Image (cartoon, rainbow, N blue to C red):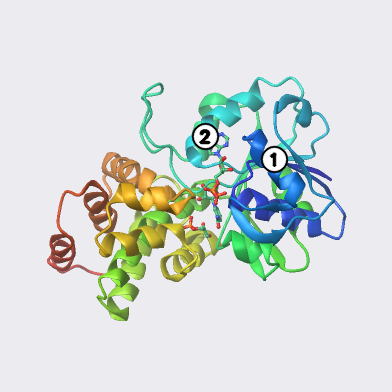
């Protein structure tokens, strides 16, 4: 297969490496937005900015520049940018006459669309809803699940979920990645898989904050469990299947990101608890932490759907500096007793 990965951050690079390692010897091209980054990666055979310490094989083709000429030979196109860039990337694909008809297009981003000035539509659109607006003719899907880029790059065992209403898209992802250390589970529930990926980032900020305040392991387990409940409530209200949240994109990715110290979102919570400001944290992170940008949009989407998300609401208050840490914790603990 010819696999084209658009976006050379940590995850795009790791996914490109996983495709390179597949025994079917795929031809893999990794596109970087920044030409200087592509040059540096070619010279050093390493992505020192986003995935330092990992050698890039000579077989990985590293490029930048115009996307359209790269599309004509692609059997699978992977969009590896943050969710904020998804609309523009899909527009580029829709308007490129070179994209082969029916070529599977898959995104890796985990978030909902943050509000932006030029498209004041419903806030908090899931990636497939953005696609329905700007590129409805494309055959698309999402690759998600518990997967720190570094561990995938290090060839450590990882299970992912490939969600799409199109069996051909699921099949393309299986053919590209399933082998050796990577297992791919197929799923038709794009709503649930995308929503799980988005909300777990917000919840990882909450658990990082809880751990940073040293509230204890009991509190963390309670946050993860009640976080899963609020993720599932919103997902089901939007049309997801409840069982999706028991799978890789739900409990799997939530447990990984909420408790794993490789998580950027968890790190945001930990550092907020230490008293750093959000701008200080974001400028030191060097990577995207999607939960920061989509927490408010998730909450607005939940409000529109009539769904309560108290932990997400606490994260929004925290990020906005609306309430003290003590008050946020107190408000969560003081909620009315409820049935589980
Ligand atoms: N790093 C990880 O372990 C995982 C990340 N993800 C998700 O994948 C997405 C990307 O994450 P990372 O690669 O880790 O982020 P990163 O912060 O390491 O890199 C972001 C990449 O996106 C590019 N980019 C940013 N804005 C762009 C734009 N407007 N147009 C084109 N390219 C643009 C940057 O140049 C950079 O190459 C996020 O939604 C993240 O939640 C999903 C699974 C694992
Ligand atoms: O999505 C991830 C793991 O599945 C990565 O999480 P962070 O973006 O918090 O690092």
Relative to residue 187, is residue 340 drawn left or right? left
Quadrant of residue 334 in the image? bottom left
Q: Residue at x 45, y 46 (%)?
A: 111
Q: CA distance from mark 2 to mark 1?
A: 19 Å
**Crowdedness near tag 1: few (<14), some (14–19) or many (≥20) residues, C-alpha within 10 Å:** many
Relative to residue 338, is residue 37 drawn left or right? right
Quadrant of residue 25 in the image? bottom right
Instruction: Tell me the tag on residue 38.
Output: 1
Relative to residue 66, is residue 51 drawn left or right? left
Quadrant of residue 311 in the image? bottom left
Q: Which quadrant of the rendered structure holds the N terminus?
A: top right
Question: Above or below — where is 32 with respect to 275?
Answer: above
Residue 330 screen position, x and y as percent: 13, 66
Residue 169 screen position, x and y as percent: 70, 44
**Residue highlighted by disc 2:** 85
Badge 1 residue CB within 8 Å of ligand 1: no
Residue 90 screen position, x and y as percent: 59, 30
Q: Which quadrant of the rendered structure holds the C terminus?
A: bottom left
Mark count: 2
Residue 273 screen position, x and y as percent: 26, 64
Badge 2 residue CB within 8 Å of ligand 1: yes
């Amino acid at each position: 297969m010819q696999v084209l990965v658009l976006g050379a951050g940590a995850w795009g690079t790791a996914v490109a490496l996983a495709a390179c390692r597949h025994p079917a010897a795929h031809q893999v091209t990794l596109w970087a937005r920044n030409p200087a980054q592509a040059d540096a990666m070619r010279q050093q055979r390493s992505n020192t900015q986003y995935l330092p310490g990992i050698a890039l094989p000579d077989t990985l083709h590293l490029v930048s520049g115009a996307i359209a000429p790269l599309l004509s030979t692609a059997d699978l196109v992977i969009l590896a940018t943050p969710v904020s860039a998804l609309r523009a990337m899909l527009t580029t694909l829709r308007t490129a006459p070179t994209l082969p008809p029916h070529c599977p297009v898959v995104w890796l981003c985990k978030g909902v669309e943050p509000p932006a000035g030029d498209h004041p539509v419903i806030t908090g659109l899931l990636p497939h809803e953005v696609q329905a607006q700007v590129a409805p003719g494309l055959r698309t899907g999402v690759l998600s699940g518990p997967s720190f880029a570094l561990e995938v790059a290090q060839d450590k065992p990882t299970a992912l979920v490939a969600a799409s209403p199109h069996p051909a898209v699921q099949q393309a992802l299986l053919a590209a990645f399933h082998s050796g250390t990577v297992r791919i589970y197929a799923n038709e529930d794009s709503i649930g898989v995308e929503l799980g990926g988005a909300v777990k980032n917000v919840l990882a900020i909450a658990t990082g904050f809880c751990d940073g305040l040293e509230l204890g392991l009991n509190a963390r387990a309670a946050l993860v469990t009640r976080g899963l409940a609020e993720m599932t409530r919103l997902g089901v209200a939007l049309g997801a299947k409840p069982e999706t949240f028991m799978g890789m994109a739900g409990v799997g990715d939530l447990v990984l990101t909420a408790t794993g110290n490789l998580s950027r979102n968890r790190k945001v919570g930990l550092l907020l608890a230490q008293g750093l400001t959000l701008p200080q944290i974001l400028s030191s992170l060097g990577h995207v932490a999607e939960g920061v940008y989509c927490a408010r949009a998730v909450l607005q989407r939940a409000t529109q759907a009539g769904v309560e998300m108290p932990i997400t609401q606490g994260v929004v208050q925290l990020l906005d500096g609306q309430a003290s840490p003590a008050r946020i914790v107190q408000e969560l603990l003081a909620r009315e007793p409820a049935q589980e």
